[in-house]
Image (cartoon, rainbow, N blue to C red):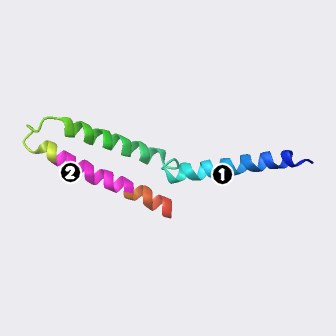
Amino acid sequence: MNRRSVLFPGVLILLLIFGYLIGCATGGGQPHMQSALDHLQAARSELSAAEANKGGHRERAIRLIDDAIDQVQRGMEFARTH
C-alpha cells in the first residue's frame, strides 16, 4: 500500500467531518428553524420599508417580530448546546 492510497481517503474523511461540523454550527442541522428565521428577517425588512401610517400597528408588528427572531435564535442555540 503506497502513501497516496492511504493519505487521500484520510483527507477526504477529515473534509467530510469538517463540513458536517460547519453545517451543524451554522444551523444546517435545524433547517426548519433556519427557514423560520430567514422568513422572520424578511418580514421585518418588509415592515421596515412600509409607510408608518398604520396607527402604530406596523411598529408593534416589528417589535413582535424582533421578539420572535430572538426566540428562534435562542431555541437554535439551546438545541446546539443540549
Q: Residue at the spot x=40%, y=57% of the render?
A: 75
Most distant residue in the right direction: 1
Find numbered disc 2 in the image and state the secondary structure of the residue it sits on. Answer: helix
Residue under pointer 2 = 63
Q: Residue at the spot x=60%, y=49% of the render?
A: 20
Range of the magenta residues?
A: 60-73
Q: Which numbered mark, 2 or 1, is in the foreground of this view?
A: 1
Residue type, numbered disc 2: Arg
Residue under pointer 1 = 17
Dominant SS type (magenta)? helix
Give the Cα distance between marks 2 and 1: 39 Å
Residue type, numbered disc 1: Ile
Q: Is residue 46 left or right of residue 12?
A: left
Residue count near mark 2 (Cα–Cα under 10 Å), binned few <14, some 14–19, many ≥20: few
Find numbered disc 1 in the image and state the secondary structure of the residue it sits on. Answer: helix
Residue 1's x, y, as percent?
92, 48
